[in-house]
Structures are given as structure tokens and as C-alpha cells.
Image (cartoon, helix red, strand yellow):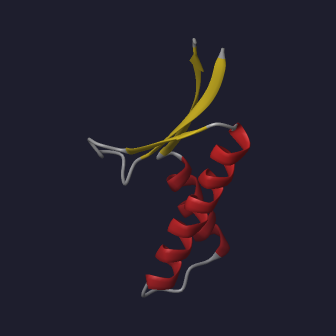
Amino acid sequence: MTTQYRLTMAIDSLDPNPETIIFDSFCDAEDYYYNEINRRVEFTVSHSPFSLTDEDIQDLEESEQQLFKIEKIELIK
């Protein structure tokens, strides 16, 4: 039995077609997850016309985390 991990990433909570990537290891999926969240938050922070507090940035990170899901997939060969 082979184990893979499916990472599902939505653009927002109403995204009808979220992006899905399959990884062979949980570590790879987790690395991609954290890197993508950081990339999205940094983009928002750098393009914001307002000065953001640490609390604002933490709220952004939490809202982005809700758009991601990692699922374990068991493949039978």
C-alpha cells in the first residue's frame, strides 16, 4: 500500500475549483503548504496601502490556513 498526500488550495472560501497537488511525502506537502501561505501573506502585506500590525498579519495567516487542506491518500497496488 502506497501513501500519498493531497494538498488542496482555494483562492477564497467560495472557490469552486481549488488547485490540488499530490505529494509522495507529508514533509513535502507541509513544506509547500507553509511556503504558499507565506507567499500569499507577503503578497498581501507588500501590496496593502495600509500599515499592518503584527495582529493583522497573524489574522491574514489564519484566514489563509483555512483555505488549505492536506489529506492522506492510501493507494492499493
Establish if 51 lies above or below 57.
Answer: below
Question: Residue 61's image quarter?
Answer: bottom right
Please identify the residue farthest to the front as the structure is shown. 77
> Percent position (x, y) of residue 67?
47, 47
Q: How many labels does the image show?
A: 0
> Who is closer to the viewer here, 28 or 49?
28
Q: Which residue is painted at 49% across and 76% down in the image?
A: 43
- Which residue is rendered at x = 40% and y = 48% of the image? 10
Q: Which residue is drawn at 56% across and 60% down?
A: 36
Residue 73 position (above or below residue 10): above
Horizontal side of 26 relative to 68 (left or right) equals right
Rendering quarter of residue 25: top right
Q: Examine the image and state in which quarter residue 35 appears.
A: bottom right
Q: Position of residue 46 (x, y in %)?
A: 51, 84
Q: Position of residue 2 (x, y in %)?
A: 65, 21
**Quadrant location of the C terminus in the rendered image:** top right
Quick one: 29 or 47, which is closer to the camera? 29
Q: Which residue lies furthest to the left in this view?
A: 16
Q: Where is residue 37 in the image (x, y as percent from the top left)?
A: 57, 59
From the viewer's side, name the closer residue of 3 and 60: 3
Which part of the image, by quadrant, shows the N terminus? Answer: top right
Image height of 38 relative to 77, above or below? below
**Residue pictured at 64% horizontal, 36% vertical:** 24
